[in-house]
Image (cartoon, rainbow, N blue to C red):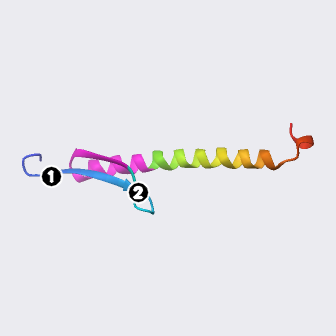
Amino acid sequence: QWLTGHVYGYVIADAENDHLDSCWGFYGMESAIEAGKETIDNLADEAQKKHETKLKAQIANSVPLEYRS
């Protein structure tokens, strides 16, 4: 596959076309697609956790002190 040029990679970018991640050197397109999907899932999980943490902090900070536990 290397000799015939069947080596693949992926680039993950956001809506503004900012580079988030990439990886190259996969033998076979299926391997590159599988690895790209796994990376996207991991990035989505990280983004969800960051969003939840930020949202919880905003909610906690908007509750008056006398009602906080």
Q: Is residue 67 left or right of residue 15?
A: right
Which residues, given as a range, are shown in magenta?
A: 21-40
Residue furthest right in the image: 66
The residue at the point 35 percent across, 50 percent down is 36
Residue furthest left in the image: 3
What amino acid type is highlighted by mark number 1?
Answer: His
Please state which of residues 5 and 57 is positioned toward the viewer in this rendering: 57
Place residue 25 in its image quadrant.
Answer: top left
For the C terminus, the quadrant is top right
Percent of width and height locating residue 39:
40, 46
Alpha-carbon neighbours of circle 1 within 10 Å: few (<14), some, or many (≥20)? few
| Secondary structure beneath label 2 | loop
Percent of width and height locating residue 44:
50, 50
Are the residues tagged 2 and 1 within 8 Å (C-beta)?
no
Q: Is residue 55 left or right of residue 15?
A: right
For residue 38: magenta?
yes
| Secondary structure beneath label 1 | loop
For residue 17: magenta?
no
Q: Is residue 51 left or right of residue 38?
A: right
In three-dimensional space, the C-alpha distance between marks 2 and 1, rounded to whole angstroms, equals: 27 Å
The residue at the point 41 percent across, 57 percent down is 18
Percent of width and height locating residue 6:
15, 52
Residue where numbered disc 1 is placed: 6
Alpha-carbon neighbours of circle 2 within 10 Å: few (<14), some, or many (≥20)? few
Please report whichever mark, 2 or 1, sits nearer to the chain's N-terminal start.
Answer: 1
The residue at the point 40 percent across, 46 percent down is 38
What amino acid type is highlighted by mark number 2?
Answer: Asp
Judge depth for marks 2 and 1 and give the one in front. Answer: 2
Residue where numbered disc 2 is placed: 18
The residue at the point 81 percent across, 50 percent down is 62
Q: Main secondary structure of the magenta part?
A: helix
